Amino acid sequence: MRLEARKYLFDIQQAADSIAAFCAGKNFEQYRADEILRAAVERKFGIVGEALARLAKDDPEVAARIPEHTRIIAFRNIIVHGYASVDDRIVWGVIEADLPALRAAVRELSGKTG
């Protein structure tokens, strides 16, 4: 695996882990009421999606091993470019339903790089 691909995986893992840490012990109502938390989570999802988009260009085979990688990139585009229409329920749903699988896939891929 190329060095750049490793860097992108590291960035994805760090950002995804941050989202999980930021939201640990929180519920949707707390998330929705906390503007700083929402901004931090959206920023980290932006990093995840951007790093994954770059990984897909640099090493498509590695990116393809991350489940739903194209949806993750599309989600990033919505958060960054469609910021006025970001639905907090959707973001929270991604945190609860999709973030654990993303973290596991990236952790597995990262473990195979050393």
Image (cartoon, helix red, strand yellow):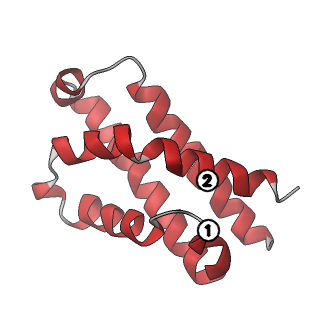
Residue sitting at 37 percent across and 67 percent down? 71
Depth order, front residue of 84/69: 69
Q: Position of residue 112 (x, y in %)?
A: 82, 57
Would you call the spot at circle 1 few (<14 residues within 10 Å), some (14-19), or many (20 or more)? Answer: few
Q: Position of residue 91 (x, y in %)?
A: 26, 45
Give the amino acid at mark 2: Ala
Give the amino acid at mark 1: Arg
Residue 24 image-quadrant placement: top left
Residue 57 falls left or right of residue 93: right
The residue at which mark 1 appears reads as 65
Residue 9 falls left or right of residue 72: right
Residue 9 image-quadrant placement: bottom right
Residue 111 falls left or right of residue 11: right
Residue 33 image-quadrant placement: top left
Residue sitting at 24 percent across and 64 percent down? 78
Q: Given contact means CB atoms under 8 Å apart, are the residues at marks 2 and 1 in contact? A: yes
Q: Position of residue 29 (x, y in %)?
A: 17, 23
Depth order, front residue of 78/64: 64
Whether 82 is drawn above or below 114: the answer is below
Depth order, front residue of 64/23: 64
The residue at which mark 2 appears reads as 105
Q: Secondary structure at mark 2?
A: helix
Residue sitting at 63 percent across and 53 percent down? 106
